[in-house]
Image: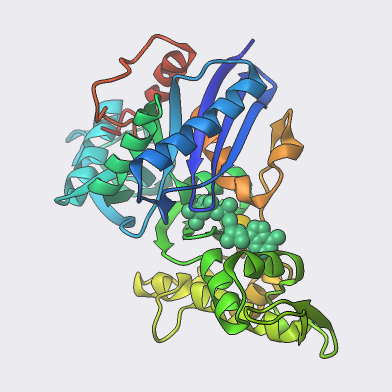
Amino acid sequence: MGISVAVVDIGTDKVVTLIGELEEGEGIHIIGVGEVKSVGVEKGVIKQLDTASRTIAISVRKAEEMAGVNVREVFINVSGHSLKSENFKESVSVSSTPAPVTDAHVQRLLELGRGKSVEENYEILHVIPRYYTLDDQSNIQDPRGLSGCRLSADIHVIKIGRNYSLNLQRAVEKAGFSVVGRVVSALASAEAVLREEEKEDGVLLIDMGAGLTDFVLYLDGSPALTGTIPFGGINVTKDISFYFRLPGDEAERIKKEKGHAFSDDVSEEEIITIKPRGETKQVSIYRKELAKVIEARIAEIIEGSDRVEGVFTRIERENFKISQARAGIVITGGCANLEGITQLVEDISGLAVRVGKPEGLIGLRDKVADPKFATAVGILKYALSSEDIRISPSKRVSSQNGLKESFLSKILEKVRKFFKDIA
Ligand SMILES: Nc1ncnc2c1ncn2[C@@H]1O[C@H](COP(=O)(O)OP(=O)(O)OP(=O)(O)O)[C@@H](O)[C@H]1O
Ligand SMILES: [Mg+2]
């Protein structure tokens, strides 16, 4: 048996637990899946501690039953309105005459990057070296062992409001589990659905969930900008509900069954029936009308508008350009299931767009093939495999659950070798 790890994706719409097992030389087997409707969590914020932690407990329990293992420690995702990323360039002296770069030099650089980013009431989650420069050699991925005098690095730091991350962690601990690692949702989703060559060429990953639209722009193989827009599928449903006078659950159903995000592709004639509030009978509407309502909101979240900052306007505000995503845009998250979303995003961006579904798994992979599982699968991949992972181990916020010797502790040891840079 391999090493098993449990991860929980705490979303606005659902809480998902995956239990995965790493088989040496084979890959990741998913052996347990527990999905429950989310209650008490909104846009990465815990609104009701008790209900949120009960939901988390039920989700883990379901996955445990399927996998036949007991879970004590979990990796979770973190996101929310307060999430922000920054880039720094730092340098250290290696020696006055060329000498080999050691791990200590690298750690010192990353510490300098971290130090620059420290901000009151914020918690730093990831410190990622983008690339190194050693004297006049640029774009070095790993400088250790190479000789030079002066080492510099471009460093990407991601942080989030401390209150939010502490409350999330409290909810998990109240459910009876220790949080052993946290991954920013956008990075997790990227891990699940992006291909290496896309990251190298430049790609924009957009995870549109129910309450949040997480995104990360990869340039030259590493994250250059990570962020979140506090809108998502819930807002689409609310618009449908308002515009067609439908109760929320009916609006949600119509969206999933008949929704379309690109009205140009919907025929003028197609008619659908809905049952508005106060009507005793079904009424007919043009599907194109529905598509226009959906399109307007999704376009606003992606592109931005006078009243809302969208993914593209945020990217421009941070002095990047959408066109730097030469491999295009990959859309994932539950909203990626919306018919016509790739056409809409192609139309507004002028770039190639595809839907990203979790890839590269063995066992139960059909169960997690939906884009809505991108974050959960990505946390699992982060936790189990990648060498360039940067997971932020969390400090305990309550005294329960002493850290136990377990498979997970062992794998963490292994994993931590790779990212001693993280506090
Ligand atoms: N077939 C579909 N068509 C349209 N929308 C869909 C479809 N399936 C799911 N969605 C929408 O996707 C959203 C849920 O996505 P997801 O499961 O990624 O959210 P979440 O991770 O729980 O929330 P968040 O990450 O925003 O906190 C809901 O708004 C839902 O209506
Ligand atoms: Mg999500």
Instruction: Count every numbered label the image shows and give the total.
Output: 0
Residue drawn at 31 percent across, 35 percent down: 170
Point out the image quarter for the C terminus. Answer: top left
**Side of 103 where 383 appears, left or right:** right
The answer to whether any part of residue 200 appears in the image is no
Residue furthest to the right in view is: 269
Q: Is residue 76 above or below residue 211?
A: above
Residue 422 pos. (x, y %): 30, 34
Seen from the viewer's position, the closer of residues 192 and 279 is 279
Colour pattern: rainbow
Residue in the picture at 39% in, 33% down: 172
Write the residue at 52% across / 26% down. 6
Q: Is residue 255 left or right of residue 59?
A: right
Q: Residue furthest front?
A: 280
Residue 318 appears in the figure: yes
Q: Position of residue 36 (x, y in %)?
A: 58, 41
Query: Vertically, is 104 above or below 168?
Result: above
Q: Residue at x 17, y 50 (%)?
A: 121
Is 343 positioned to the left or the right of 12 in the image? right
Residue 203 at x, y percent in the picture:
56, 60
- Please identify the quarter of the rendering in which residue 23 is found: top right
Q: Identify whether 198 is placed above or below 267.
A: above
Image position, residue 182 (x, y; %): 39, 37
Toward the left, the furthest residue is 120
Q: Nearer the viewer, residue 220 or 284?
A: 284
The quarter holding residue 363 reads: top right
Judge by depth and name the residue closer to the eye, 385 or 274.
274
Q: Nearer the viewer, residue 113 or 264?
A: 264
Query: Which quadrant holds the N terminus?
Result: top right
